[in-house]
Amino acid sequence: MYVKFGNVGYARKVFDEMPVRNEATWNSMVSGYVKVGLYGEAIWFFREILGRGVEASGFVFASLMSACSRAGNLVLEGVQVHGFGLKVGVVNDVFVGTSVLHFYGSYGFGDEASMFFEEMPERNVVSWTSLMVGYSNNEDAREVVNAYQLMRREGVTGNQNTYATVISSCGLMGDEFLGHQVIGQVIKAGLDTNVSVANSLVSMFGSMSELDEACYIFDHMVDRDTISWNSIISAYAQNMNYEEALKCFYRMRHSHHEINSTTISSLLSACMSPDHLNTGRVMHSLVTKHGLDSNICVGNTILTMYSEAGKSKEATQFFQEMRNTDLISWNSMMACYGREGKCMEALEMFSELLRMWRPINHVTFGSALAAFSNPEFLPEGKTIHALAITVGLHENMVVGNALVTMYGNLGFMVEASRVCQSMPNRDVITWNALIGGFSENEESDNAMQAFKSMRVEGVSANYITIVNLLGAFSAPSSLMQHGTPIHAHAIVTGFDADDYVKSSLITIYAKCGDLSSSNFLFDGMEKKSSATWNAMVAANAHSGSGETGLKIFSDMRSSSVNLDHFTFSGGLAAAANLAVLGEGEQLHGLIIKYGYESNIHVINAAMDMYGKCGEMDNVVKLLPNLVNRTRMSWNILISACARHGFFQKAIETFQEMLELGPKPDHVTFVSLLSACSHGGLADEGLKYFSLMTTEFGITPGIEHCVCIIDLLGRSGRLVEAEAFIESFPVQANDLVWRSLLATCKIHNNLELGKKAAKKLLELVPTDDSAYVLYSNVCATTGKWDDVESVRNQMVSKNVKKQPACSWVKLKNKVSSFGMGDLNHPQAKQIYAKLADLKKLIKHAGYTPDTSFALHDTDDEQKEHNLWNHSERLALAFGLINSVEGSTIRIFKNLRVCGDCHTVFKFVSGILKQPIILRDPYRFHHFSKGSCSCSDFW
């Protein structure tokens, strides 16, 4: 009686006082302990039975096997009970056999469960269902379906548990056809109104993105339980319909059904994006209110929510406050650090797991390896790789994929390819990681070859494959050869409907110089997502169409699409491209309003914007602390110092980076070499070029070659510059010859200038800069007949010189000026102001350098022409319309004239008016009669 009502304490007291005990009393006590969940005591009693020679009933064996299944930590005991059952012959009973089957399925021993099932002399619907549940617990949906089909062939009719299990598996497989077949069988069996079956149907349709079907089943359910509500909430969450998921939750609360850990976990999964984080925080509070904060499953979901939203600080705090943690908690936290590139934190967590002797699995290795995106951590990554080999997990697909990704992120594609080839099995994730690595490392041919190998192996591509492949190409020549065919493949496979594929297509056309096709694709989209809007803003910003980029950003704000850190980074890039400080500052204000001011990508974009708008102080103010400073942050700072003429500061920053920051990359050295070039530091530049190759193993690219040519040329070492071009392993392109030609103009080297111009025109026959630069070389050396000849060639070949243009922005209005411009409304005042300035600075010692007047006229006309230069008109306009003593900002589309540079120095000293002039090459800060470039530019 006491056992029947669950009072095992009194039952045990009566049992201990009994003078004589028979089989029934011993068996009752074992069953009683199992019933109330005291599984350890049940096992102890069972051993006492065996020790006393008492015969245990089949019911007791079945109860004990059930206890071992439920406990979750009694594997050895369960195997021993099975062994005793075999010895006494009770496992042939279908009831006992089914409990053994359930035990092996619960612990994930699929092979043992299958083997035992095959040996069972008698099987009923419960046995078949237990086998299916075991497969389901191991996420082997295909085997569940196979078992179900075999059961039907043997003439066994399923029950509600059978159908619930197989329907869930159909959902996991995404097999809509089979799912509808099973529904027909459910209706025929009269179980369509069963709550468990209906719940599974809701989950299945949710997994298949058939929300209308899921809602229909849910709305027509006669009875609903907590699982019903959890299923519909999860269905909405899986399909990113977060608002409806929240509405269902509020309806559930009013329906007075119990809110449990699964409810909260399903709901929290709907909040795993920055847009719904506030709702997630409310749910977090609700967890505490309902006393579910100690539930590990709920805790892990909250942890994942903060991680997915990019809130590693909140995730870390929550992890530290969790009452109970398991391996999933640790793996989630490592994945969070990995997602944000916090290698050290992830490594410390992995090390702590090992120190605590906690069990680790393939997910642990995958989470840890995902954090290594910094080449500095290559040794640690290789150590974890070696450890995976030691514990025998290196052939696991999750670990293999993580290794391919890690080596790809670190730029070690040989190792990535080797791991890929050694994997016993490869899936689409493997190939995506390899193709993505090749793309990131600008190995477009290898990326294409990997894609071909993937198709030969019979692995179907997905949208990520297309996105990674499109990212591999940026040269105009590759658009027709690879870009367009990939686009066609995306259309045929239907991947072109994916938002990320759309945005990648917009990007590749823009990168390959076909911005009109990017605009065409974007304009043709019926529904534009954040990804496609962001791609268009960035495409225009990086293609020199900053004004259009800012307009698209403005249109995006007016739409219903959410702005994210990619949006603001693109907008800042557009403002930087135009060098419009006002718009850049407005964007920065919006960033603070939207809460993205601490996002490292946005910080870097803002630093770059301020650097390109002449605000060096703001660049330094925004610089992240050493812990959060990325390689890009360092590179932007070095580049800004170089651009603004702070050459020594650029070198000091590089030295600081070597001591405290990440290892420099090829971009770092482009900025550093540029600083040495513009600062006249030829020997230092050559030293750093050598350091780049010998110390850091960076293969020089064309950009580095251009810097060295410029560096040697500016220093007058033109013979060395020419020799460098001849010895460079990469064939010189138009950038190289244009750089040499420009330095020939500085040093009046007609012979070498003629050679450079010839090489340049062979590569780009219609390049106006080649004609103009060579014409300037001829002019500065007094070869006026050659000047006339070059200009005649331009006319005959219809090559037009890009006209010089300077502009000033005052009071949110841009005023632009061309050479000798008379069309401005204030033209009369501007020229009067220039006349006054000429008198003023001549009195202070200014003498015009007429070598910068590139027409064969008398000196008086040459001087007149110089004073008609666009930057002087912009200066006069700025002085007339700005407050005395305020900084005047002038922008020019071509290199500033040397004589204008002298005039600006005189004006800044006499009028005590700071002037910032930006040309395509750098900033000139004029103050108190001197320039930041120290006249070496």
Image (cartoon, rainbow, N blue to C red):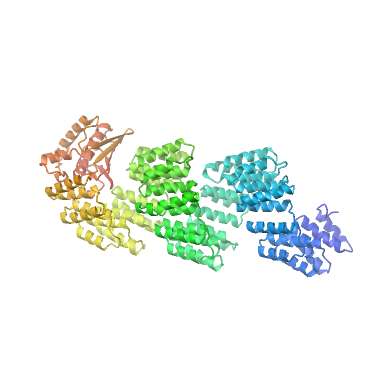
Q: Position of residue 881 (x, y in %)?
A: 27, 32
Asked whether 304 or 143 is in front, the reply is: 143
Considering the image in quadrants, where does the N terminus appear?
bottom right
In the picture, measured across the screen, residue 11 lies left or right of residue 455, that is right
In the picture, measured across the screen, residue 120 lies left or right of residue 360, that is right
Q: Position of residue 405 (x, y in %)?
A: 48, 59
In the rendered image of this protein, does residue 851 appear above or below residue 681? above
| Residue at the spot 30% in from the left edge and 47% down from the top edge | 644
Q: How many marks?
A: 0
Residue 592 in sight from this viewpoint: yes
Q: Quadrant of residue 349?
A: bottom right
Which residue is outermost to the right?
19
Residue 600 in sight from this viewpoint: no
Q: Position of residue 684 (x, y in %)?
A: 27, 58
| Residue at the spot 65% in from the left edge and 46% down from the top edge | 202
Which residue is outermost to the left?
858
Q: Position of residue 216 (x, y in %)?
A: 65, 41
In the picture, measured across the screen, residue 673 lies left or right of residue 173, that is left
